[in-house]
Image (cartoon, grey):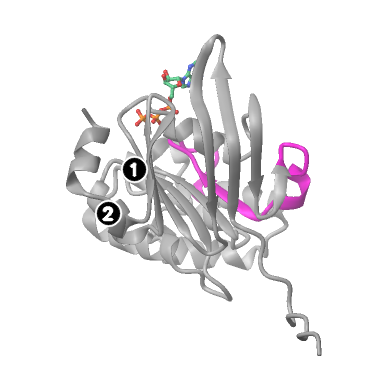
Amino acid sequence: MAPAPPATAPAAPGVQLDGLIRRRGERLVLREITLELPAGGTLALLGPNGAGKSTLLRVLAGLLRPSRGRCRVLGHELPRERHAVRGRVGYLAHEPMLYRDLTVRENLVHRARLLRAPIGQVDELLAATGLQRRASFPVAALSRGLTQRTAAAATLLADPELLLLDEPLANLDPVAAEQLGALLDARPFGVARTRVIAGHDPDAALAEADLVLGLKDGAVALLAAPAAITDAEIGALYR
Ligand SMILES: Nc1ncnc2c1ncn2[C@@H]1O[C@H](COP(=O)(O)OP(=O)(O)OP(=O)(O)O)[C@@H](O)[C@H]1O
């Protein structure tokens, strides 16, 4: 007798890159990156300044087109099927994407409306990020760390399935780093989030990732599970 089909279709991979190339003018900024990250997995991006980490995150966010090769997130081809992942991907950029003249709360309400997220999430996230007392401050009047917390809260609206995080804990004091780290870690409801995290802390990357991509001058210098990576390989990435 034929085996019964699975009750639910397996989840599409969180991220699939196939020969991804991105040029800036004549320069190759990403050179032939191929990888697959299962849904619910965490990919850590490491590499020296200018290696291409932020550029890769921008491609995954649908903000830059691949020059060649393929990029799929949550099972959808970018940029062609970008509409299918709208509101399902949270991108915390290096430079916070906030309106500086609007207050913290106004920024979050505006983003919640755009994403059609329940407005109740704004208060939940203000509390979870310790921003309640600053909710009526314009973003322009916030310190860098508080701005980063606001940007993180905005990223989490609509409970995204895929988080793209560019140095998410930069500028945060230790308490805020722990608080935000926990928020960006777990998925409050349902299955775990898929995450791609760029950073400069190899120890943290090895501790939290399922897969590590080391980029050097846009090329894949390292692609392995943390347990298979040696100190020497990490060292070579930065030489
Ligand atoms: N807007 C731009 N125009 C032209 N070149 C750019 C632009 N943004 C980035 N680059 C170039 O693309 C390359 C990759 O930059 P990217 O910001 O992706 O690196 P990164 O690994 O994120 O660096 P960092 O660790 O410093 O944040 C660099 O050589 C950079 O100079």
Q: Nearer the viewer, residue 63 or 134?
A: 63
Q: Nearer the viewer, residue 172 or 190?
A: 190
Q: For mark 1, what is the residue?
A: 199
Give the mark, 2 or 1, whose residue is nearer the N terminus: 1
User: Element at badge 2?
Assistant: helix
- Within 10 Å of disc 2 (Cα), the crowding (few <14, some 14-19, many 20+) is few
Any mark on residue 204, and which? 2
* Res 92 visible: yes
Residue farthest to the right, as pictured: 1
Q: Nearer the viewer, residue 85 or 31?
A: 31
Asked whether the residues under the numbered discs 2 and 1 touch, taking CB atoms below 8 Å apart as contact, a structural biologist would say yes
**Position of residue 31 measured from the top left corner of the image (x, y, whole percent):** 50, 27
* Res 177 visible: no
Q: Is residue 16 above or below residue 101?
A: below
**Position of residue 145 measured from the top left corner of the image (x, y, whole percent):** 33, 45
- Image quarter hosting the C terminus: top left
Magenta highlight: main SS: loop
Q: Residue at x 45, y 68 (%)?
A: 186
Amino acid type at image mark 2: Ala
**Position of residue 216 measured from the top left corner of the image (x, y, whole percent):** 36, 29
Q: Residue at x 72, y 49 (%)?
A: 76
Q: Is residue 5 above or below residue 53?
A: below
Q: Which residues are magenta?
A: 78-104
Q: Is residue 197 left or right of residue 7?
A: left
- Within 10 Å of disc 1 (Cα), the crowding (few <14, some 14-19, many 20+) is many
Q: Residue at x 73, y 43 (%)?
A: 82
Q: CA distance from mark 2 to mark 1?
A: 9 Å
**Position of residue 34 measured from the top left corner of the image (x, y, whole percent):** 54, 40
Amino acid type at image mark 1: Gly
